[in-house]
Amino acid sequence: MKPLRICMLSVHTCPLAVLGGKETGGMNVYVREVARELARRGHTVDVFTRNQNPEVPTISHALGPRARVIHVTAGPPHPMPKDAIADHLEQFVAEVLVYSDGQPYDILYAHYWLSGLAGLHLRALWGSPLLQMFHTLGRMKNKIAATPAERASERRIAAEHRLVREVDHIVAGSPMDEQHLVEEYGASPEKITVIPPGVDVRHFYPRPRAQARANIGLDPNTFVMLFVGRIEPLKGIETLLRAVKILSQRCCRLQDMQVLIIGGDASVPPEQMDEELARLMRLCNELGLDDLVTFLGKQGQDVLPDYYSAADVVVMPSHYESFGMVALEAMACGTPVVASRVGGLLFTVIDGVTGMHARSGDPESLAEKLQWLMLDPDLRARLGRQAWHMAQQYAWPRIVDHLELLFQHALEGRGSSAQVSVPSSVAHVISYVRP
C-alpha cells in the first residue's frame, strides 16, 4: 500500500515510559511497537501524548526517523487523574493541530477513551477515518471492583458508549474483548475487527536459564515465580501471595521458592509508596513471606527477557485482562504462564498447552497449578516449548500486516458512512492458533 500519514493518540500515557508504573503497561507497548513497525514500512507516524514531565523533549525520534513521539501541553506537566485530563482535551487537540504541519492525517488511531474523545474532535476537522482501541473497558472494570476507588467513573463509561456509536471502526484485542463490546456497550459486530496485540520476537526469545539467572543475580536452584505488570488490585497480586503461602504449607520449603514482582516503585519510603504496593508489602509480612517475595519496582525492556527466561513460570492472577501482553512476552521467552481464566487470557494462554488456567481470585486453584509445575520439570519444559511456538504467531510484523489492511479499507470507506465496511476477508483476521 502507499505510504500513509498516521496519527496515533495516546493521551494519558507515553509509549516511551518505563513499564510497571501506575499508568504504564500493555497499552504503552502496543502503541510503541505498532508505531515502530508502521514506520519501518515507510509510513509516517506521529504519536501524540500528554506532557507529564517538563524535563522530557517535546519531540522524540526514539522509535525511528519516520516515527515521532510528540509530548503536547494539555494541563499542567505532571501526572493527573484521568477524569481531570478529560478537562484539557480541547488544549490537547489544539496542540495536535500545531504539530500536524497544517495537513490532515490519513488515519486517526486512538487508544483508550480519552484519546477517542480527542479523535472525534480531530475527525470533525479533518474528515479522516477514526479507529479506536479501548484496551480496557470501564464496565468490565466495575464488575470486579472491590472498592469505590477502583471503579471507573460514569464519565468514562458514558464516553465509551459514545465512542462505540461514533467511531468509524473498533479494534478488539481478543474475541472476549469483542464480546464485551457487543454485550456491555451494544456495539455492532460488523464494526469490530479482532486483531490481537503482538510481541517482538527479536527481543523476547529464550536465553539459557542459568545465564539469565546469573545476569540478574538469582539463585540457580530455586523455583522462580514472576509477576510483571502494574501494581493495582485488578492484577490479583494478593491471590498470588496467598497461593504461595499455601504452597509453603502444603509441599514446599520457603527456601526452595522465589517470587519476583516487577512493577511500581518499591524503593521509595513507605509514606510515599503507592497505596496498593504498600498494602501488598504489609500482606507479605503478615504471611511470613518477606524473605521469599522481592518487589523489584519498574524494570526496563532491556532486562525483561532475562527475567522471563530466568523464571520457571510467569503468573498472571488478574481479575480482568482485555488481552495480557505479558503472557506473550513470557511465552516468546519459552516460559509457561499460569493465568486467571478471564478475558483475553482465555485465548492468549492455552490451558495444558502453553500454560495453565486458574480460577480468578482463588488462591487454592492457583496454588494447585503452581504445584504441578513446581514438581514436574518435564511438564514445565514441554509447556515452555509450546509457548515459544505459539508466540511466533503473534510477531509484530504479522499483526501490523492486518492493521495495514484495516487502514486500507477504512480509507476506501471514507465519507460513505460513520462505519467502515470491512469485508469478511479482513474481519477477524487473526484466528487464535492452536498447535
Image (cartoon, rainbow, N blue to C red):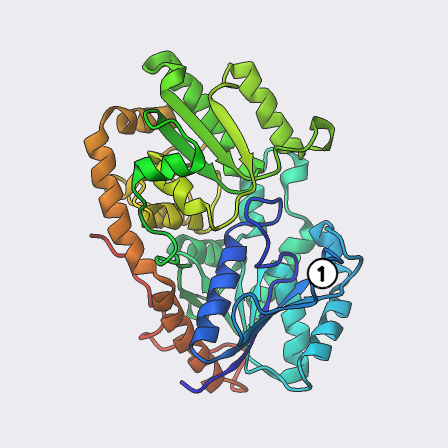
**Location of residue 158 in the rendering, given as x and y in whole percent from the top left corner:** 65, 57
Q: 276 or 209: which is nearer to us?
A: 209
**Label 1, on which residue?**
51
Q: 416 or 13: which is nearer to us?
A: 13
Tag count: 1
Left or right of residue 251, residue 385 in this image: left
**Location of residue 55 in the rendering, given as x and y in whole percent from the top left corner:** 73, 57
Image quarter for residue 17?
bottom right
Q: Residue furthest right?
A: 76
**Location of residue 154 in the rendering, given as x and y in whole percent from the top left corner:** 68, 51
Q: Name which residue lies at 31% across and 53% down.
A: 391
Q: Secondary structure at mark 1?
A: loop
Q: Is residue 360 visible?
A: yes
Left or right of residue 134, residue 73 in this image: right
Q: 403 or 20: which is nearer to us?
A: 20
Image quarter for residue 202?
bottom left
Left or right of residue 406, residue 356 in this image: left
User: Is residue 192 positioned above or below 281 on the image?
Assistant: below
**Location of residue 23 in the rendering, given as x and y in whole percent from the top left corner:** 61, 49
Left or right of residue 92, residue 128 in this image: left
Q: Name which residue lies at 22% across and 37% down.
A: 381
Q: Name which residue lies at 31% across and 35% down.
A: 210
Q: Is residue 317 visible?
A: no
Amino acid type, label 1 = Asn
Q: Name which residue lies at 36% across and 14% down.
A: 253
